[in-house]
Amino acid sequence: MEKIFTDEYFMKKALFEAEIAFEKGEIPVGAVIVVDNKIIARAHNLTELLHDVTAHAEMQAITSAANYLGAKYLKDCTLYVTLEPCQMCAGALYWSQISKIVYGASDENRGFVKMGTQLHPKTTIVSGVLEKECALLMRAFFRLKR
């Protein structure tokens, strides 16, 4: 039997959120948080709509997942996000104690790796899942803006 709940499966759900952001004129970053193969939070960037520089997809997803769980820690949860988290989001993810982060495209300029931001020592990182698709959407967005 084929395993359907793969990292690629959930990254496609995050990509759908990124496409919603794209349609709204937001930087196309999407995120979902999963526990026990169930999506408990869906989010995308809302910085333009909310006039809030902190309204990144990851931040929206963290808040939604914490509300769903009724807890501030996201242990046993996985974040799927289309772009490598920035320093701010990585800090929030550190404090949330999320178990796993899976991201698509790397952010060579502002990503947590480039910035040297630490994640929680128990957090597992997987990068490059559907990287081409995630990067393509980002490039298309900025091509339209320039």
Image (cartoon, rainbow, N blue to C red):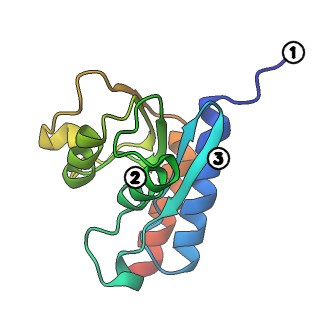
Please name the amino acid that badge 1 sits on. Met
**Which mark is nearer the camera, 1 or 3?**
1
Q: Residue furthest right?
A: 1
Task: Please determine whether, in this image, residue 128 is positioned above or below residue 61.
Answer: above
Tag of residue 1: 1
Instruction: Give me the C-alpha separation between circle 2 and circle 3.
Output: 19 Å
Classify mark 3: helix, strand or loop: helix
- Residue that appears at 49% across and 64% down: 44
Q: Which residue is mark 2?
A: 62
Quarter location, residue 36: top right
Classify mark 2: helix, strand or loop: helix
Please name the amino acid that badge 3 sits on. Lys
Q: Are marks 2 and 3 in contact (CB under 8 Å)?
A: no
- Residue that appears at 28% across and 78% down: 52
Q: Closest to the observer: 11 or 77?
A: 77
Q: Which residue is mark 3?
A: 12
Task: Please determine whether, in this image, residue 20 is positioned above or below residue 11.
Answer: below
- Residue that appears at 21% across and 54% down: 88
Percent coordinates x, y for residue 37 in the rendering: 65, 33
Instruction: Give me the C-alpha separation between circle 2 and circle 1.
Output: 33 Å
Classify mark 1: helix, strand or loop: loop
Please name the amino acid that badge 2 sits on. Ile
Percent coordinates x, y for residue 6 in the rendering: 66, 28
Tell me: 136 left or right of 5. left
Image quarter of the N terminus: top right
